[in-house]
Image: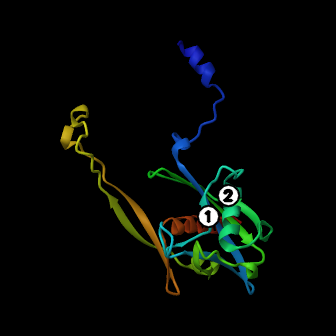
Amino acid sequence: MDPAKIIAQLKGRVPSIMGHENFRKSAVLVPLIEVGSETHILFEVRSLNMRSQPGDICFPGGRIDQEDKDPRQCSIRETTEELGISGDDIRDVIPLDYVVNDLGRIIYPFVGKITRPERIIPSEAEVEEVFTVPLSYFLDTNPETYKVNFQVSPEDDFPYHLIVGGEDYNWQVRHINELFYQYDGKVIWGLTAKILTHFISLIKNDEKTS
């Protein structure tokens, strides 16, 4: 195949994430509600009966299903299922930056307003409890940051003879920053804290430029 034919075949292609078809895709919603005259963010505590991360604090959300038109619709559907509200109770759903990690996951976060929080009836199967934190707390509070190091550990049959350096190859040790917020006895960390910090940074940047 000559170069001209290759270029013609690929011309106009829109790039995506390599291997995205094999990634597990989820969507979450950062729910804003009004408490009195103050804006709060709503969080869920995952049911203690859940197989994955029981008792962890999270935003409403879950895996994107085939019937979901797009990640935005998934975030709304999951929120209605977990909080027992209707789609009409969720307004102004706006995308945040999505997250891609090395464990084969893509998470699409959104922010939106729950207009009638008094209608919330959490799903007992998925939600242990819900609580809110004033937005002002996160605007005024930086998260605690701790490093988690990753160690490379090839399997026993790894073909060291195929790489320069063999068994003495200098693997690069990586780390991630885990973020923690503590409020009224609740600990918000992990992906939830990462999405939250990103959301807060967008608000602060907008305030600086306005």
Find numbered disc 2 in the image and state the secondary structure of the residue it sits on. Answer: helix
Residue position for label 2: 74
134 with respect to 35 (left or right): left
| Residue 9 image position (x, y, % from top left) | 61, 21
The figure's colour scheme reads rainbow
| Residue 114 image position (x, y, % from top left) | 74, 73
Is residue 207 at all visible to an observer of this figure? no
- Residue 177 is labelled as none
| Residue 47 image position (x, y, % from top left) | 54, 75
| Residue 183 image position (x, y, % from top left) | 52, 83
Callout 1 touching callout 2 (CB < 8 Å): yes
Location of residue 205 (image quadrant): bottom right
| Figure quadrant of the C terminus | bottom right
Q: CA distance from mark 1 to mark 2?
A: 8 Å
Instruction: Look at 62% across and 54% down and name the residue there.
Output: 64
Q: Is residue 132 above or below residue 75?
A: below
203 with respect to 157 (left or right): right
- Front residue of 199/85: it is 85
Instruction: Look at 47% across and 69% down and name the residue there.
Output: 53
Location of residue 81 (image quadrant): bottom right
11 with respect to 47 (left or right): right
Q: Is residue 151 above or below residue 83?
A: above
- Front residue of 121/185: it is 121
Q: Earlier in the sequence, mark 1 or mark 2?
A: 1
- Front residue of 13/43: it is 43
Q: Residue furthest top?
A: 2
- Residue 61 is labelled as 1
Is residue 116 at all visible to an observer of this figure? yes
The amino acid pointed to by label 2 is Cys
The amino acid pointed to by label 1 is Gly
